[in-house]
Amino acid sequence: MRTENTFSETKKLILKIGKIYNIPKDELESVIQPNRVVEVSLPIQVNGKTKIFLGYRAQHNNKLGPYKGGIRFHEQVNKDEVMALSLLMTLKTALTGIPFGGGKGGIAVNPKDLSESELENLSREYVRSLFDVIGPNKDIPAPDVNTNPKILNWMVEEYIKRAKVEKNVLSLEKLYGAFTGKSRNSHGLDGREEATGYGGAVILESLTKYLGKNTSDMRVAIQGFGNVGYYFAKFATKLGFIVVAVSDSKGAITSNNSTFKNSLDIEKIFACKLEKGALAGCYCAGGVCDINEGTVLSNDELLTLPVDILVPSALGNVITEKNMRKIQAKIIIEMANGPITPQAHEYLSKRGVIIIPDILANAAGVSCSYLEWRQNIEEIKYQKEEVFSELQNIMRKAFKNVWNEANEKKLDLRSASYGIALKKLVP
């Protein structure tokens, strides 16, 4: 999770980049501050007793379209965090040309402490409390940390139930557009699960081409083997990259062979993890799983492996002042939100490390949410091939714009990404 002062850190960065672009401070302030932050108390029955949980929804900016952003369930969710993440979502949608604004929400809860029925009650209570400020043309939530299609299905069901009571004039299909990230059998989008990882792999391929490199010469280590990390690894190997290490919350696996000649067998590793519950003991390469051929590492050790490309795709703030000097990768793809602290980012950039910022690297998630929303609003149906084609076009265009901006203004890619977004958002 991100730190308590994330919003102030993001503000400092925007003010710094605004100076480069000669944007007046008062105009930047109008972009930085959220339009509103809604805080709600959510009473539900837990083990037969009433317990009150705190929920939040930051609606940052809707200049370019309805607010858009995920809902996370985590004990550390707080006002500062949702404000910062909603600001980053505003920048992300502006950067990619998606007609949405930025939002973010969450509930301060450890979902593992609740039964499924209690979790459902909490999810529905959150929607009831925010019904008046969300909707397909107002604010469109999506999954995030510890939320998934099942939870979003509960939420959209509750929203539609309330909308019918309020005699909402929208058709049923359009009402499903109030949330994205739904399961496919509940008016969701085919390909949504793979989208963020797929988009990140497309960005990496684009970077490789601009650098004049061959994918088969690039060794990749991926921290995080959840939904994003798994699909990034899957599509990266299909594109020819050599994925040599992956990790989950319990540790990492890589080859005993320090030359890293062979790519891991991502599909077999994923199947092994599902069976064993963890990656340890799941070293698979060349169609064979053999623990004796692999080495188990810590997540921290994975970050410092001698690879070409490092992909933090799980938590924020994993590359810091403590380990930044040990990073050997020449390229970092920020698939997680905020995986590099500002101090570490500055140090690594000065050292010549190319960093694809999170607002670009993982933007396929919100791009896919836009397609799902459009599918509901326009009452059409996208096939997976169409979804991937649209995502590929969006991501390649966004990368090209950032790359050209960075080279023209002699900026790092994060500054160029923010600059492009800010120019669309200032008055």
Image (cartoon, helix red, strand yellow):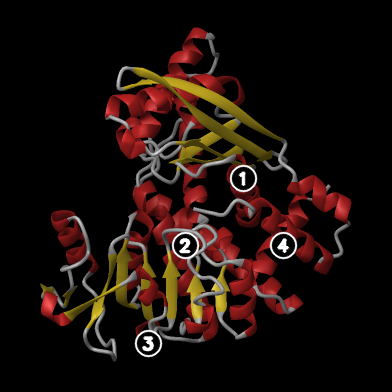
Q: Which residue was labeled with disc 3? A: 217
Per the image, label 4 sits on a secondary structure element best described as helix
C-alpha span from label 3 to label 1: 37 Å
Residue placed most toward the observer, 60 or 10: 10
Could you say which disc has been placed on residue 201 in the image?
Answer: none
**Residue ID for mark 1:** 86
Q: Amino acid at mark 4?
A: Leu
Q: Which residue is mark 2?
A: 335
Marks 3 and 1, the one that precedes in the sequence: 1
Name the element at disc 1. Answer: helix
Q: Earlier in the sequence, mark 4 or mark 2?
A: 4
Residue at 50% over, 79% down:
331
Q: Residues within 10 Å of mark 1 (few under 14, many from 20)?
A: many
Amino acid type at mark 1: Ser
Whole-angstrom CA distance, mark 1 to mark 2, is: 17 Å
Using residue 383 as the reference point, say whether residue 108 is left or right of it: right
